Structures are given as structure tokens and as C-alpha cells.
Amino acid sequence: MELLDILEHAMFKSKKHHDSMLQVLQIKRSNELFINHYKLKYNEMFPIWVVVEVSSFGLLSKIYSNLKDEDQNKIASEYYNTKGEYIRTWLHAISTFRNICAHYGRIYNRNLEITPKLFRKDKKRGINNDSIFAIVYIIGRLLTGEKDWDYFITRFIALVEQYDIVDLSLMGFPKDWKQILKDLR
């Protein structure tokens, strides 16, 4: 999908949300070298990676959410072996969680209002979709690089061991959380 496609409201469910997205997407006004390259050499035909590079996570979540269902499902199936509705809720929940953290909101002993949709097997493993653990878990589901995920788990376990006074169950971590996260790979 190139920027030309993103500029076409026919690619999206809601013209109103599409117009709002275009107001936030400031790609043509950017002075980044790689953007200027595409402006000059390719007549402003930007590949999707350029759009991703200059967009906030919240905007990317909104772009995905407003894509037509068949496009959401194609992306979700091809990259994550699931349905678009799952990815849509995952991105929204992560974006909301990121905003809580960015504005110094409390995450300890908190249930989330914006929740990701989980599979039955995830719920059977003790993952509550309104928990901080659910956010960590779906980030692991979305990450495709095994080394990145292993690095995160290693660092996270070290952090938990360093601050063993923190009760992870108050953030929705089940007893076997380490194994659940390792099983994602």
C-alpha cells in the first residue's frame, strides 16, 4: 500500500475518520531526508514504511482500525495468523496503554478500560484481558523477531528479580507468566 492508497478514502470504512487521519498525517510537510527523496524522485509516491516511520503509534492504530475489514483480515492473516478484529483491539489497547505510561498514569494494581480481544486458549491460561499482563502478552504476539522478544523477556525477568517487592499478580500476571511468555516463541 503506497501513500496514494492512504490518500484515497475509498480504501477506508469512514470518510470522516479518513479525513481526520489525513489532517494528523503530516508527511508532505516533513523535511526528513528520506521523505524529500520520495517527494522528488517518485513524485510523492511514498511506500507504506515511510508513512509508518513518521506516524505515531496511535495514528497507526487508527489507520488500521479504519481499513476495510477485508484488508484488516488480510494483514492479520498473513502476518499474525489471526483475524483483523484481534489485531484492531490489540493495537488500540497497546496505544491506550502507551498513553497511560506517557502521561505517568498508574499501571500497578489497575484494570484497563480499553482491552485486547484474547483467544479462548489465552483465557484458559489465566490471562485476563483487562490486565497489564495482557498488554505484555499481545506485544509478544505482535513482535516477529525472536531475538527481540528473548531480549525483552531476559531484561524483564532481571527487573522483576531486582524489585521482588512488586506483586505481579496485582498487574494480572499469572503464576506461570514466564512460561507463557516464553511459549510465544
Image: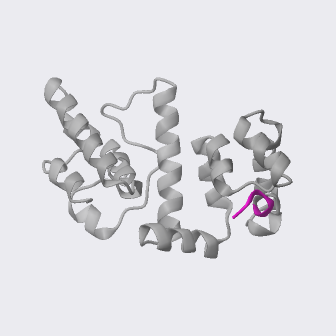
Count how many numbered circles sit on residues in the image.
0
Asked if 87 appears above or below 163 in the picture, the reply is below
Provide the residue span drawn in magenta. Answer: 1-5
Q: Residue at x 27, y 42 (%)?
A: 151
173 is within the stretch colored magenta: no
Asked if 158 appears above or below 130 in the picture, the reply is above
Q: Residue at x 82, y 63 (%)?
A: 8
Q: Residue at x 86, y 54 (%)?
A: 43
Majority secondary structure of magenta residues: helix
Question: How far across and down, in percent of the image, does residue 4 sit?
Answer: 80, 60
Asked if 181 appears above or below 37 in the picture, the reply is below
In the rendered image, the residue lying farthest to the front is: 41
Residue 176 versus residue 38: which sits nearer the camera? Answer: 38
Apparent side of residue 97 relative to residue 49 in the rendered image (left or right)? left
Residue 103 seen in this snapshot: yes
Residue 90 versus residue 76: which sits nearer the camera? Answer: 76
Q: Residue at x 20, y 61 (%)?
A: 125
Residue 159 versus residue 118: which sits nearer the camera? Answer: 159
Question: How far across and down, in percent of the image, does residue 154 sit?
Answer: 21, 39
Question: How far across and down, in percent of the image, does residue 11 sit?
Answer: 75, 68
Residue 25 seen in this snapshot: no
Apparent side of residue 72 relative to residue 154 in the rendered image (left or right)? right
Q: Classify residue 46 by image quadrant.
A: bottom right
Q: Quadrant of the N terminus?
A: bottom right
